[in-house]
Amino acid sequence: MKKNLVVIGYGGMGGWHVNHALKSDAVNLLGIYDIKEERENAAKEKGIYAYSSLEEVLNDKRVDLVTIATPNDVHKEIAVRALIEGGKNVISEKPVTLSTADLQSMIDASEKAGRIFTVHQNRRWDVDYLATKKLYESGDIGAVFNIESRIHGSRGIPSDWRGIKEFGGGMLYDWGVHLIDQILQIVKEPIVGIYCRFDHITNDEVDDGFKLEIEFTTGSRAYIEVGTYNFIQLPRFYMQGKNGTAIVQDWRENCKVVKCKHWHESEVIPVETAAGLTKTMAPRNSITVDEYEIDRPESDVHDFYRNICAAIDGKEEQFVTHVQMMRVLKVIEAAFESGEKNQKVLVTI
Ligand code: NAD
């Protein structure tokens, strides 16, 4: 049976949840709640019920599940109230909250209430990520020693609460959460080191981009970069394994793989550069490498709500677990510490 859902915060992402809920085979939208009258009216104009207060949502016995799509700083307060006062199951938008201490109090509240609590890591359904993960897990390019994940835009931080610290603004809390979560889903190894540098090109108060290095216990590395002042974009994913290299240029493109067939070459034709010759950096030919593309994996983002509803019924484990949520926030805290100290931070995550 479908679960009854209320979306709290009917802005950009709240609108996304509402539109998806209206097409969902897992949830039934009862309405929205937003502190702004204009957003209430926008819902009413579409024939969607607008609750007049959070209390009205929490006291409505029909409500099984709330999705919190407010600015980041109030996720914790609303989630704890919904769990404890309302006995509701809770999905929080990302970042689930701003610190590991706050996350722990949300987890404690969900355990006390005996209700599901998770975060909407919808970018686990992105096909660029799924293709990279599939290749990593296939072992086709051998043991991966370096994986790079980048997202580049050229419009700075959106001119809303995302540019203000007290609301939990900044790009590490924004796109950073997605990219860290994706990497931790691909590389399932403990993390031992974090080094992060932050950009402040268009905003002094919060980061408008960052460069984050993650070192894993095996010595393999991940590099995550978010930029909002990049008028030329670097590839979305770049991955090096002991048998080859893979690249996803853009989220609309396939994953391209170049795999090493023969390490040794009988004859290398040197390339002439502006000032000399190089054999070392000359491209390989088809005798020693294979080139192919990975099909774009199937992906249905409605599986997120399907999973949560099944988890509420005790039929499935929730897809985004408390341990995974905590690991992402630990990386974020270590990244801020690294940025402040301007040095690598040793961690066990
Ligand atoms: P937004 O500013 O467009 O919308 C936020 C809405 O919340 C506003 O309408 C505001 O009036 C309302 N609001 C603020 N405080 C409230 C409160 N206490 N109670 C009820 N309503 C309140 O912001 P957005 O872009 O929709 O972002 C909302 C959340 O969704 C953020 O946490 C953001 O990180 C997340 N988000 C996630 C994705 C994703 O892909 N998963 C994409 C965009 C945004």
Image (spheres, grey):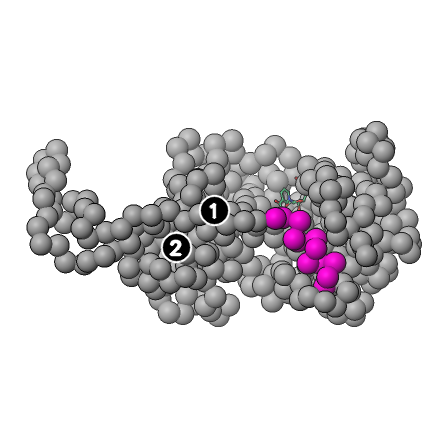
| C-alpha separation, residue under disc 1 versus residue under disc 2 | 19 Å
Residue at the location (66% across, 49% down)? 302
Q: Residues within 10 Å of mark 1 (few under 14, many from 20)?
A: some
- Residue 249 lies left or right of residue 130; in this view the side is left
Q: Nearer the viewer, residue 144 or 80?
A: 144
The secondary structure type at the circle numbered 2 is strand
Extent of the magenta region: 300-311
> Where is mark 2, residue-wise?
147
Determine the quadrant in which ligand 1 lies. Answer: top right
> Where is mark 1, residue-wise?
296
Residue at the location (81% across, 45% down)? 29
Residue type at tag 1: Arg
Residue 12, how many percent across, how many down? 68, 37
Residue 132, how many percent across, how many down? 44, 52
Q: Nearer the viewer, residue 200 or 106?
A: 106
* Magenta part, dominant SS: helix
Q: Residues within 10 Å of mark 2 (few under 14, many from 20)?
A: many
**Residue 304: within the magenta?**
yes
